[in-house]
Image: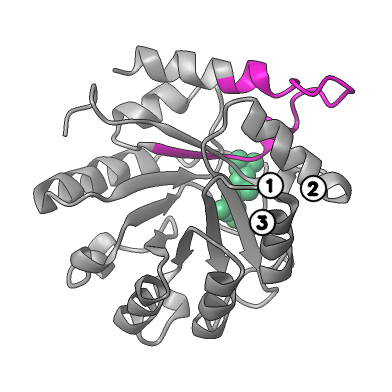
């Protein structure tokens, strides 16, 4: 697949949304043109922060959200929560290989539950975890910050890792998305796309955009992302 034909998807991370008005925030960001809802699950064990779980995912579905929900599990152990997120209506479920004792089994659990599966790579986690499971992943997610918090700076070494992940995905000839998570901003998204990413998580860059009574307040940042992505083709 060439850069020109790969479709780019924007996945705002609701970690930076206003949790007191979460349904409305998700509605607004989707109305502004976002493609995927990135849902960060932290357990204060695998990562030093505590966020939201399957009840909130289910609540968003009940609220009427039909867009794909991308559940990024930063939890250990993972398998029981995989089942809970399948039941809660997640579309993608991704987890960190270090957090599962049986990676192949965890990936299979996700697909057997009708969801799309993915592995997440911390900055220092080698891509070799993909070696024997390329046929079991629908998404490869590269962390461009250490997981746990929004608002951190993009680690530039991730660009070379993205190129290597893109090479592996293209060589596999499989339909696998390459997602990047952490420090994605309007001024670096084009470079990240040129390195091979096709799915872009952005938390603080989206939700710190002016919050006021205008329901279209996220339009300008999503539009700016798309304009930048167009230059990367
Ligand atoms: C970090 C999370 C990210 C985070 C990204 O552990 O996985 O999804 O919300 O936030 P920004 O875009 O602010 O770096
Ligand atoms: Zn994330």
Q: Are marks 1 and 2 in contact (CB under 8 Å)?
A: yes
Q: Quadrant of residue 110?
A: bottom left
Residue matched to label 3:
61
- Give the residue at x 46% y 26%: 189
In primary-sequence order, the first of circles 2 and 3 is 2
Q: Which corner quadrant holds the N terminus? A: top left
- Say the numbered circle drawn on residue 22: 2
- Determine the CA span between mark 1 and mark 3: 14 Å
| Neighbour tally class for label 3: few under 14, some 14-19, many 20 plus, Cα within 10 Å | some
Mark 1 or 2, nearer chain start: 1
- The CA distance from mark 1 to mark 2 is 8 Å
Structural distance between the alpha carbons of marks 2 and 3: 12 Å
Foreground residue, 211 or 190? 211
Mark 1 = which residue?
A: 14
Q: Position of residue 12 (x, y in %)?
A: 60, 39
Quarter-wise, where is residue 88 in the image?
bottom right
């Amino acid at each position: 697949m060439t850069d020109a034909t790969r479709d780019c998807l924007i996945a705002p991370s609701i970690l930076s949304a206003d949790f007191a008005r979460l349904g409305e925030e998700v509605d607004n960001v989707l109305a502004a043109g976002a493609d995927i809802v990135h849902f960060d699950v932290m357990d204060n064990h695998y990562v030093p922060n505590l966020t939201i779980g399957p009840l909130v995912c289910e609540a968003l579905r009940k609220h009427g959200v039909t867009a794909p929900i991308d559940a990024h599990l930063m939890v250990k152990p993972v398998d029981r929560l995989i089942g809970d997120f399948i039941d809660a209506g997640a579309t993608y479920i991704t987890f960190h290989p270090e957090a599962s004792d049986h990676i192949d089994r965890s990936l299979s659990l996700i697909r057997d539950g009708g969801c799309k599966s993915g592995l997440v790579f911390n900055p220092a986690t080698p891509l070799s975890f993909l070696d024997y499971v390329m046929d079991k992943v629908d998404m490869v997610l590269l962390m461009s910050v250490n997981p746990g918090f929004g608002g951190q700076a993009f680690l530039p070494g991730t660009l070379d890792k993205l190129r290597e992940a893109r090479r592996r995905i293209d060589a596999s000839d499989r339909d696998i998305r390459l997602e990047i998570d952490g420090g994605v901003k309007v001024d670096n998204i084009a470079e990240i796309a040129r390195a091979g990413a096709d799915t872009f998580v952005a938390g603080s860059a989206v939700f710190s955009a002016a919050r006021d009574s205008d329901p279209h307040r996220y339009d300008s940042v999503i539009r700016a992302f798309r304009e930048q992505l167009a230059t990367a083709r």
